[in-house]
Image (cartoon, rainbow, N blue to C red):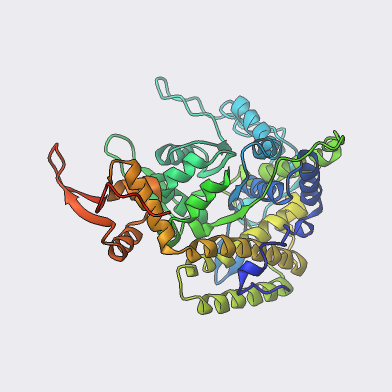
Amino acid sequence: MNRISDNPSKVDGDDPFPTSMLPERLQTMVRDVARVFRVPDVMPAVIALTMVSAAIGKGLRIASGSGRKTMANLFSLVSADSGTGKTTVLRVLREPLDILQAHMKEFGHQKGLHRLGTQESQHRGEGSGGFEGSAGDIEVLPPRPRGSAKMPDPRLICSEITGPALARLLQHNQQVILNATAEAGVLLDEASKAASPLGQLLLKGFSGDPVEIDRITREPVVMEEPCISVCWLCQPHRLDKFLANERLLEDGLLPRFLVAHSNASMAAIDGDDSSIPVAVSDAYGALLEELFVLYGRNSNDEWVVQASAEAQAVMRDHHNQCVERWNADAGSLRSCIARWMEQTWKIALVLHAALHGADSHDKTLNGETARCAVTLQQWFARKQMVILGEKASKPATTRLEKLCRLLLENGGEITLRNLQNSHGFPEAEIRRLVESAPQKLILQKRQNPGGGRPSRVVGLSNPDSQPSA
């Protein structure tokens, strides 16, 4: 088994995505999507993994030790330049979920059980997860009281959204949702703001922590266990800006993401106009449908996958490697390392479900699947360390020059709040830069013309001077 590199800069140049670790139905779909749309495997692979995690929802979990039961939901963030295919690739791979969502929208409020397939009649869950009847049985929901508000359409997927709107969607969709977009720049900016409602909700929705939001003008939002999957694609500079935010690293949002630069480029046309084989796309779509029908849309039921003794040994060895790596790193990257095992268990459950489909709850996680999950997580860990390591290794003068140029472009001064929320400069970093360059920067209080509390403002000591190149 490959160990996590202590020198990640040596593995980034020639480290292709390990597509062979994926189960056959995912592997074949990923390779064909990459071939047809001329993109690196990493882009369709990460999207496909996240789509499977979203189809599972929280109806299927994995026993991950010490009484924990980990959900399958993944947070993924992959970059690609504009015009290199990310919108098309996402559209193709999320299409099965879009079809399911359209079906739910058409029948969801008239028929409590949506006629999506026959898996329900073929399986009986253990414990609280048992089904009675068949997919042909229809449970008619009681009529809404006269004058009551219209129920929102059931949703599986949302795209551009605010934190409060996401909370409402979760409330009306069994506390489960997938946020997926090929242009995540606005969401990245929103999640990066200090005390962002979106960022706070994402933090809770990754591990299923309880949410209580009290609002003055609306009913409170109370959720016992929200489950959010995230599939964001963006341009490279957007990902770099997101990862440069030290506060997100410290708060724990950034470490929850599987991140990678896809390095996709505009590809030449070679005369091969073949499409994805129907059998391949059908098998992929059928996988997502059967997982959603049995697990995803029944979030109040719960099946738990057990790990075999061999799989437990694999995971234990990987955990100890993560501990060793954590002890060797005294810096801010510890917050990322601390999330590696949780991500590994999530990936393992996704691979297990992609391998066994609707039989997943009757199968134990085997050692081979556990090793594949470790290999995939280690690949993402290397990419994470490379990107964050590059950010950490940039000289402070580079950030100082960037801040000076930003101040110059905005009349010589910007409030500390604005620099944090809109430009990715955490307060701690700003104070360090001011202390290191008092001849260039000054931090002071400025009384607001309209009254109220004064604002803390960062300004140029000499606004007429240009920042050094």
- The answer to whether residue 225 shows anywhere in this view is no
Q: Position of residue 29 (x, y in %)?
A: 78, 45
Q: Position of residue 175 (x, y in %)?
A: 50, 44
Q: Position of residue 452 (x, y in %)?
A: 14, 43
In the rendered view, does 206 fall on the left or right side of 274?
A: left
Q: Nearer the viewer, residue 402 or 181?
A: 402
Q: Nearer the viewer, residue 3 or 73?
A: 3
- Residue at horizontal 62 percent and vertical 25 percent from the top: 106
Q: Is 331 placed above or below 228 here? A: below
- Residue at horizontal 14 percent and vertical 45 percent from the top: 447
Residue that lies at the very extreme toward the top in this rendered image: 147
In the rendered view, does 287 fall on the left or right side of 218?
A: right
- The answer to whether residue 239 shows anywhere in this view is yes
Q: Position of residue 8 (x, y in %)?
A: 62, 69
- Residue at horizontal 52 percent and vertical 46 percent from the top: 238
Q: Nearer the viewer, residue 204 or 407?
A: 407
Q: Nearer the viewer, residue 12 or 375?
A: 12
Q: Is 143 placed above or below 414 here? A: above
- Residue at horizontal 83 percent and vertical 41 percent from the top: 280
Which quarter of the rendering shows the N terminus? bottom right
